[in-house]
Amino acid sequence: MLWYVAIGSAAGGVIRYLLGGAVQRAFAASFPVGTLVINVTGSALLGFIFRYALETPAVTPEIRALLGIGFCGGYTTFSTFSYETLALLEDGDWRRAGLYAGLSLVGSVLAAFLGFMAARELIALRTRL
């Protein structure tokens, strides 16, 4: 099981590095939009994986560990989010720190909910086929 988690974590970390950097460069902003995108998409993905995996026999415990604990754990960057929020606060940019923290929290919870709903729809579709 540890190998599944390790492989998933490595893949998630690499994707986080590539995608987060690409998004940050694309927006060329001092606002940490790359980390925000990673946190929100990671939450959506984790919500989808766990809802789908726990409600269908299609996902083995090993694959659930690889994708949920490993990939999503390596992909999401909550520790980076915390650091970037503190950096904005230390710079005295309370407004942007609050905006970033609020968008991250609300966006990630909403994305996890949307992931749950997408998995529910996929399960319903599979049962109809």
Image: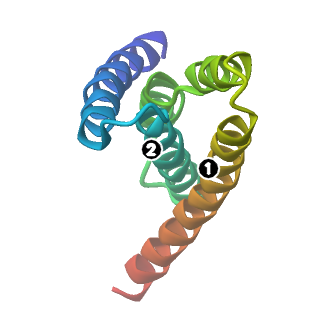
Residue 129 vs residue 60: left or right?
Answer: left
Q: Residue at coordinates 64% horizontally, 50% vertically from top-left?
A: 103
Amino acid type of the residue that numbered disc 1 sits on in the rendered structure: Ser
Query: Residue 53 location in percent, x, y?
Result: 52, 51
Where 89 sits versus 61, above or below? above
Residue 56 is labelled as: none
Residue 86 in which image quadrant = top right
Mark toward the viewer: 1 or 2: 2
Task: Name the residue beneath numbered marker 2.
Answer: 37
Q: CA distance from mark 1 to mark 2?
A: 9 Å
Q: Secondary structure at mark 2?
A: helix
Q: In the image as oriented, which residue stretches furthest toward the front?
A: 92
Q: Mark 1–mark 2 contact, CB under 8 Å?
A: no
Amino acid type of the residue that numbered disc 2 sits on in the rendered structure: Val
Q: Secondary structure at mark 1?
A: helix
Task: Name the residue beneath numbered marker 1.
Answer: 108
Image quarter of the C terminus: bottom left
Q: Nearer the viewer, residue 22 or 58?
A: 22
Q: Nearer the viewer, residue 109 or 124?
A: 109
Q: Residue at coordinates 56% horizontally, 20% vertically from top-left?
A: 80
Where 60 sits versus 111, above or below? above
